[in-house]
Image (cartoon, helix red, strand yellow):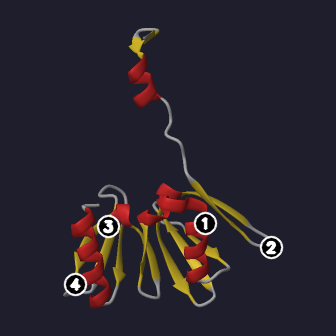
Amino acid sequence: MMVGHLPYLFIKFYLLPKMLQRVYFNSRDVLIRIDVQKIVFFEGDGNYTYIVTANKQKICLTMNLAHTEDALAAQLGKNAKQFMRIGKRFIVNMNYIHLVDVQKQILALSDCEQFLFQLKVSKEALKTVKELVIQTKI
């Protein structure tokens, strides 16, 4: 099938925007709507969680990391598997794992173009991350 001078498949796969999957976080005063692919990681800080995005924005949620993890699972279903809880402090988007350095206790998250975040993580947690990445070939 041709549309104008371009084959239909070309239009279907290259010109139409991808469907965005968004998550919503709602509090008494604030609604946050964010594209899942823009989330690099979540960082827990007591009763608060910070969303860190690909454009280096840091958004504060008034919920702890466990509630954030539950909200992701409820809204994303099986797609929530792209996020991994690492220790008590982080939930990371596994699509952005760039480097796992167990000796230096560093987990680097990057898109290899615009951002690089280095998180300090325990050796035990990094060993688990490393094994999971090797097994799943993420």
Q: Which of marks 2 and 1 is nearer the N terminus?
A: 2
Instruction: Please state, as top left, top right, bottom left or bottom right, where the N terminus lies in the image.
Output: top left
Amino acid residing under circle 1: Ala
Amino acid residing under circle 2: Arg
Disc 2 residue crowd, few under 14, some 14–19, many 20+, Cα 10 Å: few
- Which tag is nearer the camera, tag 1 or tag 3? 1
Name the spot of residue 112 as percent of width and height, x first: 29, 58
> Residue placed at 63% from the left, 88% from the top?
47
Name the spot of residue 111 as percent of width and height, x first: 34, 58
Residue hosting label 3: 97
Q: Quadrant of residue 119?
A: bottom left
Is any part of residue 55 visible from this angle? no
Q: Which of marks 1 and 4 is nearer the N terminus?
A: 1
How far apart are the alpha carbons under marks 1 and 4?
32 Å
Looking at the rendered structure, which numbered label has been put on residue 74? 1
Q: In which quarter of the image is residue 33?
A: bottom right
Amino acid residing under circle 4: Val
As drawn, 43 above or below 16 = below
- Circle 1 SS class: helix
Amino acid residing under circle 3: Ile
Residue hosting label 2: 28
Name the spot of residue 118 as percent of width and height, x first: 34, 76
> Residue placed at 61% from the left, 83% from the top?
64
How far apart are the alpha carbons under marks 2 and 4?
41 Å
Instruction: Please state, as top left, top right, bottom left or bottom right, where the C terminus lies in the image.
Output: bottom left
Residue hosting label 4: 102
How far apart are the alpha carbons under marks 1 and 3?
23 Å
Q: Which of marks 2 and 4 is nearer the N terminus?
A: 2
- Which tag is nearer the camera, tag 1 or tag 4? 1
